[in-house]
C-alpha cells in the first residue's frame, strides 16, 4: 500500500488545473464534436493543448479531431 501511495503522490504532483478561460475558445467546436456534452470540456482542453486524451469511451474515440487512447493501448505505449 505504501508503494501505491507513493505512485499516486508522484502522479498527482504533476497534475495542474487548467482554468476554463484558457480553453474556452475551443468549447463551441468541442460541443459539436463531443458524443456526450460532459465530454466537451475535456475535448476543448485537448484541442487547445494539441494533446491526446486518455479514455475508454469508444464514442469519444470516434470523433476525428483528437486522438483518444484507451488504457490498454496507453499501457502498451508506455511499455515500449
Image (tube, rainbow, N blue to C red):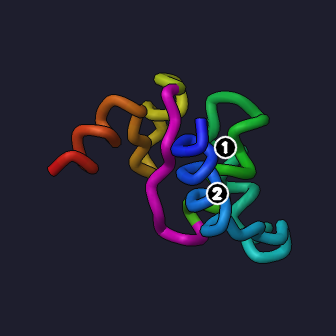
Q: Is residue 51 magenta?
A: yes
Please determine whether, in this image, residue 59 is positioned above or below residue 27. Answer: above
User: Mark number for residue 9?
Assistant: 2
Please determine whether, in this image, residue 32 is positioned above or below residue 28. Answer: above
Instruction: Give the residue number, with chain letter if any, for mark 1.
Output: 32
Which segment is the magenta one?
A: 48-56
Residue drawn at x 47%, y 63% as measured from the top left:
51
Which mark is in front, 2 or 1? 2
Please determine whether, in this image, residue 57 is positioned above or below residue 78. Answer: above
- Sequence order check, earlier mark of 2 and 1: 2
Helix, strand or loop under label 1: helix
Residue drawn at x 48%, y 38% as measured from the top left:
63
> What residue occupies the far left of the structure in this picture?
80
Residue drawn at x 63%, y 38% as measured from the top left:
34
On the picture, is 74 further left or further right than 49? left
On the picture, is 11 further left or further right than 25? left
User: Mark number for residue 15?
Assistant: none
Q: Quadrant of the N terminus?
A: top right
Amino acid at each position: 500500500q505504501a508503494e501505491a501511495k507513493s505512485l499516486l503522490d508522484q502522479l498527482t504532483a504533476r497534475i495542474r488545473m487548467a482554468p476554463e478561460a484558457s480553453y474556452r475558445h475551443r468549447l463551441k467546436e468541442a460541443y459539436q464534436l463531443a458524443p456526450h456534452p460532459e465530454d466537451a470540456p475535456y475535448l476543448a482542453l485537448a484541442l487547445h493543448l494539441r494533446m491526446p486524451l486518455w479514455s475508454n469511451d469508444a464514442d469519444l474515440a470516434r470523433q476525428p479531431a483528437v486522438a483518444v487512447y484507451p488504457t490498454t493501448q496507453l499501457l502498451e505505449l508506455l511499455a515500449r
